[in-house]
Image (cartoon, grey):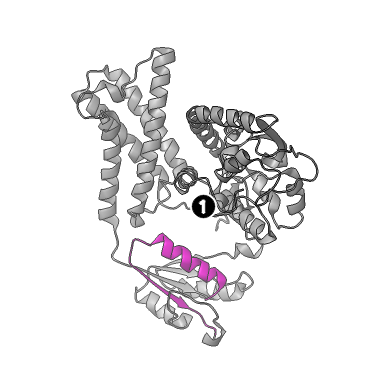
Amino acid sequence: MLSHRIRIKRRGYPIIAKFMDFFLMNFASILFFCLFSQQILYSGIIFSVLFSIVFLWFAEYTGVYNYRIKSLRFSEFYRLAGTCLLAFVFMECLRLLLTYFGKFRLPGLWEYDLFPPLIWPYLVPLLTVFIIRLILLKQFKQKKIRIAIVGMTPAGLAAERELLKEYSWEKIDLSYYDDREESRFGYLTHAPYLGKVNDLLERARKGDLDEIYIALPMAAVERIRHFLSMMSDTTVDTFIIPDLYSYSTYTTEVRMIGNMQAVSILSSPFDDGGAIIKRAEDLILGSIITLLIAPLMLLIAIGIKLTSRGPVIFKQDRYGLSGQKITVYKFRSMRVMENADVVIQATKKDPRVTRFGSFLRRKSLDELPQFINVLQGRMSIVGPRPHAIAHNEEYRQLVDNYMIRHKVKPGITGLAQINGYRGEVDTLDKMEKRIQYDINYIQNWSLWLDIKIIFQTITKGFSGENAY
């Protein structure tokens, strides 16, 4: 009897890869401690196990294991290097805390004279992971993968785009097949159209294809069944691309409920362990940044007091997680303190803005007190920027899916901001673009994405032509 349960296949073999990394990292690290370390072996074992667990924990949310073994790319090594750096920083912070508060010694950076800057305890297991990846890359690298798409449709175009991205570091022979007349094709594609499905069947029977993707509308049930019946006479891997976007453009994941599959329409990425990672990121980075900017914040506070009357900190109500009202802190940059049902956006040469406040706003320095909001748990470092409640109520009526952005905590910086959508929103189109970037961030969140946004915020600077 056939089962109607669908097995959700992940990209690659994450469980095997994780177990292999855990075993090899600990083997290499413990071997190093046995041969070269003067520390007690028990302490070295604890360090090895902790470090490998921390590495795997970060790797889960930086996408290190979202690769196919047969299509491992050099670009994955950048992600791996970033994860190694995160694990290293976390372990050193943990080691210092344990040493300072608990008098518990773990081997760390400053206890070896072998190699400046004395990073052997970390370097040995991480080099092992890199070497294993290089061996896999050489062992499984294919000369060319041959793929056919049935249906020159929007779903087919989406499949082409993702396949080209997936195999960007490999040679790929990609082509379209469709039984309709060529005059009905109105799409620009990278891959060529090579004929009817019967032509595809001949190629498949000759073993001239590796994968086939059927990208027809869900309404074409009989045609899909007919093509599947034809492909069953071959040994080619065949996939159906479900047109889930016909229901909603914000489909994010397939979730298992017992033996039943459910398609999630933009669920929060922080329902499970992601919430712990996100909060740890905010606490660790938020604490470090707050300490670093404390002298600057003191100077700004003095500048505000010397240049205008009124309080240093301006408090304004905004919508936070789940649309709940929160209080957000900013350095006061105006002569007024607007927090009512009607809030007028700042414009260029706005008379309400003080001279010193204009400088703060251009450089986004007025946002620095929001790191206190981050430590409080009201905001995140990265996320959709919070809008004044009056503006929220206005735009939720004008922009589709506006309130989806409140499935996560608001942030100090975000995907929209590094792409130029910050400051005054003087047209509806600008707000729609900002919301699209916010939703894109929620759909594709990972720890690695947060790191890239923070890095780009720093490198691109905090100023912009719309910030005033």
Residue 297 position, x and y percent, is 55, 30
Residue 319 position, x and y percent, is 71, 41
Give the amino acid type for the residue marked by disc 1 in the picture.
Ile
Query: How many numbered callouts?
Result: 1
Where, by quadrant of the figure, is residue 165 drawn?
Answer: bottom left
Residue in front for this viewpoint, 384 or 228: 384
Residue in front for this viewpoint, 354 or 74: 354
The residue most toward the right is 341
Where, by quadrant of the figure, is residue 143 drawn?
Answer: bottom left
- Position of the N terminus by quadrant: bottom right
Which residue is depicted at the point 39% across and 34% down? 87
Residue designated by label 1: 8
Above or below residue 64? Residue 285 is: above
Circle 1 packing at 10 Å, graded few (<14), some (14-19), many (20+), is few
* Magenta segment includes 276: no
Q: Is residue 447 left or right of residue 258?
A: left
Q: Which range is magenta?
A: 152-180
Residue 450 position, x and y percent, is 50, 44
* Magenta segment includes 168: yes
Residue 254 in sight in this render: no
Residue in front for this viewpoint, 340 or 310: 310
Residue 320 in sight in this render: yes
Residue in front for this viewpoint, 86 or 170: 86
Above or below residue 338? Residue 6 is: below
Where, by quadrant of the figure, is residue 108 drawn?
Answer: top left
Residue 405 position, x and y percent, is 65, 48
Which residue is depicted at the point 34% across and 76% down? 206
Which residue is depicted at the point 64% across and 58% down? 430
**SS of the residue under disc 1:** loop
